[in-house]
Amino acid sequence: MPYLTGHHGNPSSTHRFGRLARAAVDTAREQVAELVHAHPSQVVFTSGGTEANNFAIKGVVADRGPGSIAIGATEHPSVENSAAALKKNGWRISTLAVDRQGRLRENTLEQALALSPVLVSVMMANNETGTIQNIAAISQVVRTGGALMHTDAVQAAGKIEVDFIASGVHLMSLSAHKLNGPKGVGALVVDKTVDLPPLQHGGGQEKNRRSGTENVAGIAGFGMAASLAKAQLADYGARTGNLRNRLESGLRAIGGIKIFAAEAARLPNTVCFGMPDIDGETLLLNLDRSGFAISSGSACASGNPEPSPILLAMGVEPTLARSSIRVSLASGNTEEDIDLFIAALSTQRGQLRRMAGRAVG
Ligand code: PLP
């Protein structure tokens, strides 16, 4: 709030107001670096996870002629569409298949590495199912294959332990609003060995890697959110993990519900499930009226009647994928919330089924 209401300095100014803003940005850089065990000099602030992913993918190839890159089959659209944009410029894109739990299949990584890709991009945790990839193991294979490794850690940071060094990646994307920070700010963490030309040219901010006057209030908020997330990480994991187990027990008790990626290591706060014969969007609207804010498929794709491409990549039947609901638990949720949700879901499902039965009859 101080940087929205009182401290209006520009971090590039040398006068005292500028120095105050610069200090806020520097503190936030340290806080974000600390959350993911990186060095502050490796943190480049961006306008969010989308820009960080675009920067990583398009930046790595910027000074090179067309070659190949590989991306996971369940990546966020900001990775998928960045790769699709490169395809138009002659780049070959390999898609790394996943198993039914959403985990990368090792053999597809080896096949992709045979094409000597410049970059491999695999997300740390999935935004719909919560599936966590073994990024350290993947990075090791990728490095041995001579490629650069990027991970989209937007969903993972602040929810599970994320270690930039131990993960072995060269580039890591982060977003503030996934860890209770403000929207419209994120970061790309860049290993010192990576030559990453800027995509955004201008006044040379962020050590000439991302020009443009810094979003000081957003960056300060990101830093504070990162610091709080780090302090609360163990407690958050245990608490939301217990709530998720309660939610999944409730879903199993209702019956006829498929929990996706149930056998994979997953984020503690994410549950994605499908209910045969139910339209996820209709259920979502009805539950919203009852006070429950949930998503069908990915929030970015809500309103899109197509089944989730992530679930399709995991081999889920299109009709079941179309019924998918994603519940993301927050630290403020309680056991009572879970119980009320299960009761509302059970009632809504019964009503929707009866209506579908009448429509057919
Ligand atoms: N990557 C993942 C996995 C996400 O879930 C999201 C947002 O939902 C993004 C990237 C994009 O981040 P932002 O909303 O900060 O642009």
Image: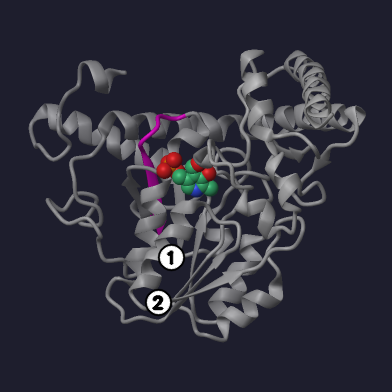
CB atoms at circles 1 and 2 under 8 Å apart?
yes
Compared across the picture, whether 64 is left or right of 114 comes to left
Q: How is the image coloured?
A: one colour
Give the spatial CA distance, label 1 vs label 2.
8 Å
Please tell me whether mark 1 sits on a helix, a strand or a loop. Answer: helix
Query: Which stretch appears magenta?
Result: 181-191
Residue drawn 32% across the image and 65% down it: 59
Could you tell me the amino acid type at mark 1?
A: Ala
Query: Left or right of 166: which side holds 290?
Result: right
- Judge whether residue 178 is colored magenta: no
Left/right placement of residue 182 relative to residue 283 reads left
> Which image quadrant is residue 20 in?
top left
Placement of 129 over or under 5, stated as above or below: below
Identify residue for label 2.
Answer: 91
Visible residue check, residue 330: no
The residue located at (29%, 71%) in the rendering is 62
Q: Residue tagged by mark 1? A: 83
Q: Is residue 291 above or below residue 273?
A: above
Residue pushed farthest front? 361
Label number found at residue 232: none
- If you read the primary sequence from the N terminus, does the residue marked by circle 1 or circle 2 appear first? 1
Residue 138 percent across, percent down from the top left: 62, 68
Q: Residue 253, image x and y in percent? A: 92, 28
Looking at the rendered structure, the secondary structure element under dot 2 is loop
Instruction: Look at label 2 and name its amino acid.
Output: Trp
Numbered circles on residues, count: 2
Residue 162: percent from left, percent from top:
57, 49
Q: Is residue 186 magenta?
A: yes
